[in-house]
Image: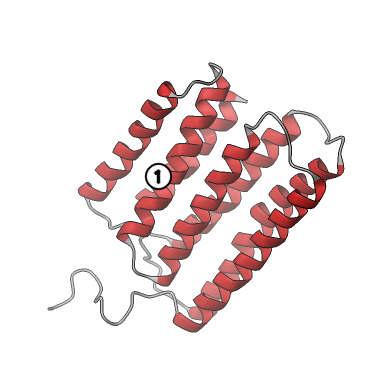
Amino acid sequence: MTYLLIALLVVLVLPLLTSSWRISLVGLGLQGLLMTAMVSHRGWPATGAGAVLLVDLLVLRTWFVPRHLVAIMRREAPSARTDVIPANLLSWAMAGAAVLLAFRFAGLVRSAEGVASLRVAVATAGLLLGLLILATQASTFGQIVGLLRIEYAIALFELGAGHEPSLPVQAGLSVILLLSVLTLGSFLRRMGAAEPPDRPPAGSAS
């Protein structure tokens, strides 16, 4: 399980160092795949809620979310360069500080040692990095990626809970995720993926 969490942390950080919207969406899919592997590591789910959770992670988060947004982005034909956070040392330093703060927070949380504390650290890092994207991006695509990263981080927190939700609750969570992604995709179609008109691209003349 430890190697899956380390791989997930790498997937959280690497897309921030690139300028490709495709890599950002592939990163979301990989997050879902790694969380699916974490659930599968426990064995085949013995309850209906566990089966719905597995479908949520594997079908919705790993396959549908990135595929749906990729299809929209291709129709929008955005620039190949689409930074999720500003491509400068300050932004990257803030991302690094967020990861360090997440591990510091996990060390202060009273939880079991080892994998449990590592899960808290990685989930907190995902949450803080999602907030960083929301704070530094005004483009529709960047805001959507930030929101989804936060939602995925919350899902990782939930995987560390000592109990699984009931079937109606888990099914409701999956339906809410599906409706949220469809709504976000609708915003992306209507508003486009580029920066808003009142915020010119970086490097343009004032």
Residue closer to the observer: 92 or 144: 144
Q: Tell me where residue 197 appears, x and y as whole percent.
A: 29, 82
Residue closer to the observer: 6 or 185: 185
Identify the image quadrant of residue 33: top right
- For the point 43% across and 51% down, the residue is 130
Question: Which class describes the residues within 10 Å of circle 1: few (<14), some (14-19), or many (20+)?
Answer: many
Scheme by which the image is coloured: secondary structure
Q: Is residue 103 above or below residue 59?
A: above
Farthest left residue in view? 206
- For the point 73% across and 54% down, the residue is 59
Count of labels in the image: 1
Q: Is residue 54 left or right of residue 135?
A: right
Q: Is residue 124 above or below residue 167?
A: above
Q: Is residue 57 left or right of residue 202?
A: right
Q: Is residue 114 left or right of residue 104?
A: right
Instruction: Kindly state the secondary structure of the residue where label 1 is placed.
Output: helix
Q: Tell me where residue 95 appears, x and y as whole percent.
A: 32, 43
Identify residue for label 1. 128
The quadrant of the picture occupied by the N terminus is: top right
Q: Is residue 125 left or right of residue 41?
A: left
Q: Tell me where residue 67 appears, x and y as whole percent.
A: 63, 64
The quadrant of the picture occupied by the C terminus is: bottom left
- For the point 59% across and 40% down, the residue is 156
Q: Tell me where residue 157 appears, x and y as whole percent.
A: 57, 38
Q: Amino acid at mark 1?
A: Leu
- For the point 44% across and 68% down, the residue is 141
Identify the image quadrant of residue 70: bottom right
